[in-house]
Amino acid sequence: MNNISSKPCLKLGIASYLPYMYVSGPDDAPVVRGSQPAILDIIFGYLGYCYEYVVVPGRDGGTKQPNGSWTGVIGMVLRGEIDMPGVGMALTYERNLDVAPSEFLYIDGWSAGFQRPVVQSDISGFVKPFSDYVWLLTAAALLGVLVTIWCVHLSHETIMGPRNPKGGALRNAENYVTRQSLLWTIAVFLAQSVTKLPRGNSVRVITGIWLLVSLILNTVYRSNLKAMLILPKVVLPFDNPEELAESGIATWIPRGSALHNAGLKSPPNSALGQIMERSNSLELPTDVPWGIRDMIAGKHAMTSPRGSLSAIMHETFSQTGQCLIYTMSENVLGMVQVSFLLRKDSHLKAELDPVIRRLREFGILDYEFKKQIFNATECQKPIGSQGARKLRPLDLGDFYGVFMLYAGGALMALVSFLMEVLLHKTKHSEKVDGDYNDENTRNSTMTKMKPGQGCPSGNTDGVLTTMVGLNNQSCIKIHAFMHSPYMTIRGTPDNLVVEGSMVEIHRIIFDKLGYW
């Protein structure tokens, strides 16, 4: 801006420093806006100076070279090409050695901004109510309860159940106990009804305790899952410099800025050193619109003063009505003083300091600053507090995890069914072959049977007998007489054939009882 004054016009070097100064357009006809132009009008209108803007080549603050010279705004100040910067700059130790700072305008810290995370579909959301450790303990408890119920129930059945000298009762009890233990343990844990009640007080006590534990686990799980759906927790990609360094996200750093100069002095293995290594902007001229655009798109994290990030929040919210970025809670670089940086022999310092001090104490500086970022307050609220205002309907992706679990269970059931069918066919084939061989043997024996031939000794007393087994142990004699159609006798006394349904019934009964 040019003011009419008797004093010489000052040349002010400018570069973008949001929200204090926005510089757009060509270098020979820049478009300048922000809080700083209004402050400059107040200061130089009071002091009686006119001024004009000079766009700094590269539009960066300046970096000290190995030969001691400076680039950017500071270099132009020290070479006398401009009288002073047109915007406040962060004061660092190196800058303080070569320039004279004015009274501070603001105190600000450097942070990093990134694309604001949103609640999205989570395939594994149904397992999130419990941590991995809790799920592991639950699985161990489930297995422990299953073994306990099985042991207690088997002991009860062994003591209270019927005895069989051949051991069949014990085998039947084991099968029964295994089925019932699995049913009571897993069905109760999944909150499913159980058709059979446990027998015995000891078994009922164990099952009752597990019923209570399962009720607590199911209630807590459902409550946590409901809370996660009602007020979802958004996980931030990073919230401190260490997390930013470990995330591997590219960083946008203004060339010649205070952060750039501090990063050059940082050890490579430090958090700031690793952030510098991932920078994609230090070899290029400072392009603020590109930095903002790719930060919103999630291509890189933008490291800037907090005031600048607040200005970006204000601009995006004013244009879209949405908060598109977030700022991490910790600083990359501590609080720094923002001042006009002058030559050490400049007469302007003595004139500027009293005016700046009065503007700061009367709140004019803060007033002009707040005017540039008033819409940022909505985006500076905690992300969780905003989540309650906007509900996200469940979409298909939220159910993928459950569908996969159901499909896995159905696949396991199908495999089990096919194995049962295969085993059944195999056993049935073996049984048919065995029955066929036994039948042929018995038929051949029965067709050649004579009276008294079935058992090894004893007198038949003229009563016809037939052999119902091939083993001579525990052999019994059965009276055979004509009773059609249940039993028929044909043939000669030397070659008798006994047929009928009763013969087969005898064979089944006495095979089951162990008699021959």
Image (cartoon, grey):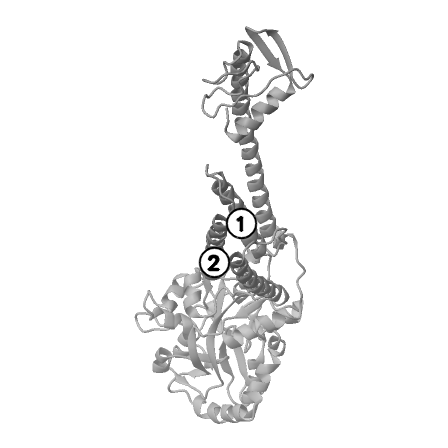
Work out whether residue 230 or residue 282 is closer to the camera in this orientation and state it.
230
**Residue 189 vs residue 466, the one in the foreground:** 466
Q: Looking at the picture, which amino acid does disc 2 mark? A: Ala
- Residue receiving disc 2: 141
Q: Is residue 123 left or right of residue 170?
A: right
Q: Is residue 383 visible?
A: yes
Residue 373 screen position, x and y as percent:
60, 77
Please say if 454 is above or below 349. above
Q: How far is disc 2 from disc 1 in space, using C-alphas?
A: 14 Å
The residue to which callout 1 is attached is 182
Report the residue at 57% width, 21% height from top.
478
Q: Which numbered dot is residue 264?
A: none
Residue 354 on image: x %, y % = 48, 94
Mark 1, Cα crowd under 10 Å, few <14 / some 14-19 / many 20+, is: some
> In the picture, residue 364 is in which quadrant?
bottom right
**Residue 303 location, x and y as percent?**
47, 69
Quarter of the image that includes the N terminus: bottom right
Mark 1: secondary structure: helix
The quadrant holding residue 72 is bottom left
Q: Secondary structure at mark 2?
A: helix
Direction from residue 91 to residue 14 in the image, left or right: right
